[in-house]
Image (spheres, rainbow, N blue to C red):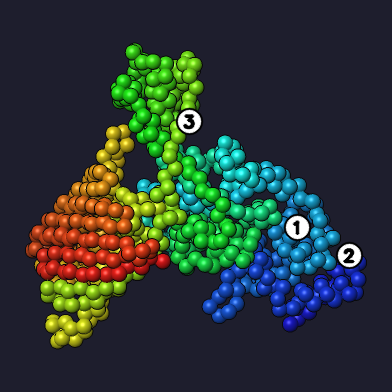
Amino acid sequence: MIRAFFILNILIFSCSVFSASSKEFNQLIKTGLNNSAHLDAQWLNALHYKKTLFGGFQSEADSKSFFFAKDGEDNSKSEMQATILALLEGKPSDINQHAQCRFPTRTKIIKRLFPDLANNLKIVCPQFEEFKKKLSAKAVSIVFSSYYLDTPASAFGHTLMRFSKYADPKEGESFELLDNAVNYSANVTTNNALIYGLLGLSGGFKGEFAFMPYFYKVREYNDFESRDIWDYHLNLNQEQIDTVVTHVWEMKQTYFAYWYLTENCSYHMLSLLDVANPNWRLAERNPYFVVPVDTIQTVKDTPNLLKTVSFRPSKRRVIKSRLEKMSSEEKSSFDQMAKDFTKPFDDEGLSEKSKANVLDAAMDFLDYKYAEEILMNNSTPSAWKRKFLIARSKISIKSKEVQIPFPTKEQPQLGHRSRRIAIGGGKASESDAFGLFEYRFTLHDLLDNPIGHNKDAWMEMGNFKFRYHPKVESKGDSSMFRLDDFSLFHVLSLSPLQEYFSTMTWTARLGAKTIKDEGCSYCFTPMMRIGGGLSQDFNWLVYYVLLSTEAEAWKNIGDKGYRFGAGPEGGIVLRFTDKFQAFLKGEYIRRFFTDHEWTYEYSGSLRMELFENNSLETSYTRFEREGEALVKYLLYF
C-alpha cells in the first residue's frame, strides 16, 4: 500500500513536470491504476507474461534488466507504473540507454494506452534507428529448416524469422541472401552429449535471440547440413511488421531459460508474432510441449496469416538433380573427377555445354562434400575449387540455375500432427485379453503418413504404452494395469544406398520395456539399444538390415541382474499408398551374462489412415514366450 502511494505521487509529480492539465492528470492516474490497463494483451505479450496456476502472471524473461519494478517479473501493474516513470525520465549522457530507446515496443504500447503521454515520448534513438534502417523490413517470414538427425538439437527441425526488404515474396526471392534474420537458440556450454541432453531438457542453458545476416543460416542449413529450407511468408501489415522489429530489438535486454521441449525456437517465434497481434494467440494455442513443425502448422491454421510458401533446396538435392540430367559422357567425366579431385579435368570429347555441366556439378559437389573446408583459403578443397573455377571461366556458356520442382508432398505444414494417442485391445496367448492406451509426445514412425515428414526416418520422443488386463491367472484372476513399454527417444535413420551420398543407417533407443522371452518373466527393465547397417529405398518398398547391441538391467535377469545382447535386426516397409502401409520386422539376438543365450522377435503391422489425423492399425507380434494380436485406433493432435 505504501509502495503504491509512493509510485502514485511520483507519477503525479512527473505529470506536473510536462505541464499536463488537471483533467489530464486525473485521467492518466485513473487509467494507470485501474484494473485493466496493465492487463492489456499486447502489454502482457511484450513482457512475456503467462498465467500461473493460481491466477496471477509470471514473465518467462529471466534477466532482471528486463524489468523496471523490483517485482516486475510477476506484477504487470507494478511494472507498467515503473515503466511509465522510466520513459518520462530525463535524457542520460548516452541517449541510447534511455528507456524509450531500450524498449521501443513498450513505448508504443504506453502511447496507445496513455495518449496524454504521447508528446513526451518522442526521443530519437540513433542505434535503434540504424537497426531499423538496416532491416528496412517490408515483410516477415517464418523459416523452417528440415529434420537433421545427425544433431540431436535439430532432429525435429528448426525455425527462425527472416525480415525481407521486399513486400512481394516473388520480388524478394532474388535478393533474399541480403536479408536479415533473428534466431533463438540455447547458449550451449558443453560438448558432452549426455550433459547437453540433461541441461536442454531441464532449462539449464540460457536461451538468447541473435540477429544475423540471413545467408549465414542458409550456408549452415542448406550447405553444411544439406537441409531443405521452407519459407512461410506471413500476411502482416506494415504496423505489425514494425512491432515485430521493435520487439526483436528489445530482446537484447534479456534471456530465457532454454527448454528443449517447451521454451524453444518454435515457441519463441510465435511469441514474437503475438506481440504484433495478440488476437492470434499463437503461443497460447500450442500445447505445453512444442516442436518446430507445430509452429508452422499453427501459422497455417490461423486465418489470413499465411501468404505463400517457398522452397530452397539443399545442396545435396541440387547435385542429385544435376547428375540425373547428365548424359552418359558427362556422367563418366564427373565420376573421374569425383573419385580424385587432384587429377586435371579431362574434357576430351566433350562439347562446351557438357564441359560446363560437368564443372558446375563438380563445384557443387565440392561445396556439398567439403562445406566448411571450402571456405578456408588455404585448404585443399578450396584449391581444387579454384582450379575448376579457372577452367569454368574459359567457357563462354553461362551457368544456369538448377530448377527443382516444388515438392508439394514434402511441405511440413501438410504433415500429421506431432502428438498421438492410441486406444485399442488385443489378445496374448498367455495373458489373454487386454486393453491398451498409448501416448506419444512426438513425432513420426515408418507407418505414419509420410506426407510432410521424413519418410525414411523413425523419430519418436516420449512414447508411453499402457495395458490393462482384466483377468490375470498368475495374480489369482485379478486385474492388472501396467506400463508395458516406454521410449525416452527412439530413432531409426534410414540412409538408402546412393552413389556419392550414402551414409550409415543407424538406430538408437533409450527407455524401458517388458521382457517377453525366456530370460525373464515379464520383467519391466530399463534398456538401451544402438545399431548400424544399411538400407535401400525403392519408393514403394524400403528395407534395412542392422547389427544392433542392447543392454538391459533388472534384479530378476539371471544371476547378475543385467544382460547384454548383439545380433541382426531388419525390416521391410511396403508403401501401397501414403495412407496405407505395411511393416514387417524381426530380430535374432545373442544374449550375454545370462543362461538364456538366444532370443527372437518378429512382427507384421498394417496401418490405414481413415481420414486426416485419424488412423487404424492391426498387428501381430511373435515373442519367444507368446504371440500377441492387437488392433488400435490412432488420433494425432
Helix, strand or loop at label 2? It is loop
Q: Residue furthest top?
A: 348
Q: Position of residue 315 (x, y in %)?
A: 42, 36
Residue depicted at x 81% and y 75%: 29
Which numbered disc, 2 or 1, marks the residue that appears first in the sequence?
Answer: 2
Residue carrying label 2: 18
Which numbered disc, 3 or 1, marks the residue that appears first in the sequence?
Answer: 1
Residue 128 or residue 453, whichever sits in front: 453
* Spatial CA span between label 3 and label 1: 47 Å
Q: Which mark, residue 100?
A: 1
* Spatial CA span between label 2 and label 3: 61 Å
Residue 232 or residue 269, whichever sits in front: 232
How busy is the neighbourhood of tag 3: few (under 14 within 10 Å), some, or many (20 plus)? few
Q: Look at the picture and state if 508 lies above or below 6.
A: above
Q: Which mark, residue 401?
A: 3
Amino acid under label 3? Glu
Which numbered disc, 2 or 3, marks the residue that appears first in the sequence?
Answer: 2
Helix, strand or loop at label 3? It is loop
Amino acid under label 2? Phe
Q: Which mark, residue 291?
A: none
Residue depicted at x 87% and y 72%: 24
Q: Position of residue 487 (x, y in %)?
A: 30, 64
How busy is the neighbourhood of tag 2: few (under 14 within 10 Å), some, or many (20 plus)? few
Residue 406 or residue 104, whichever sits in front: 406
Give the quadrant of the C terminus. bottom left
